[in-house]
Amino acid sequence: MMNISTRTLPEGYAQTVEIDLKKNKRLAITLNVAALVIAVPGFFLLASFAASARPELMNSSGTVSVGVLAILMGLMVILFTLHEAVHGFLFWVFTRSRPVFAMRLFYAYAGAPAWYIPVRQYAIVTVGPLVIIGAVGLLLMLTVPESWVLFIVFVVAMNTGGSAGDLLVLTRLFKLSATSLANDTGDVVSFYENP
Ligand SMILES: [Zn+2]
């Protein structure tokens, strides 16, 4: 039973699944469309949640300044960095070695190319940013000054949409045996099973 990460693929393991965003451009683009399909209704859903949890928000006049778009762009950059940093931190937790980070046209990534990671630990690496940024974001929505609430809502909605690829990988994990190992180069996730 493998429950620690290893740099060497153990005897008897063979690759059974591969998700390759570099080869599969269509999948990469589909994930970006899925991100929008999740993020836009997510934004309105979270905004109405914030409004019902904090009724005083409805009284504040929402003035949209010229700087708002710039703030949103800045928040996107911070969010993408933070999202990948959470993946990277969790890779470090399970491998105790420095992860890799990179930007592509349609996605950013963190990876641990030298490692085979048990799937249960890899599941935590995968959903970490969705769960942690989501939970912190919900808490902030309820506590920050009124004028910040919609920015937090924006960040949480974008993070949830941007986790579409992570959720796709997670659905694959459920189909694997508990002893499986994951190798994540960033562009390519491969799963290895011991038949
Ligand atoms: Zn992610």
Image: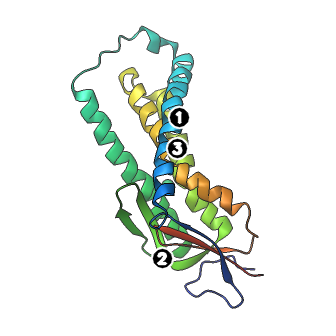
Q: Which residue is mark 3?
A: 34
Measured as percent of width and height from the top left, residue 107 is found at 41, 56
Q: Looking at the image, do the residues carrying marks 1 and 2 touch, with CB atoms under 8 Å apart?
A: no
Mark 3 and mark 2 lie on one chain; the one further toward the N terminus is 3
Q: In this image, 91 relative to 194: left or right?
A: left
Q: Outermost residue toward the top?
A: 59
User: Nearer the observer, disc 3 or disc 1?
Assistant: 3
Residue 79 drawn above or below residue 101: above
Question: Which residue does the numbered mark 2 point to in the structure image?
Answer: 113
Q: Secondary structure at mark 1?
A: helix
Please report contact status of discs 3 and 2: CB closer than 8 Å, yes or no.
no
Residue that mark 1 sits on:
138
| Outermost residue to the front | 26
**Cα separation between marks 3 and 1:** 22 Å
Foreground: 127 or 167? Answer: 167
Quarter of the rendering occupied by the C terminus? bottom right
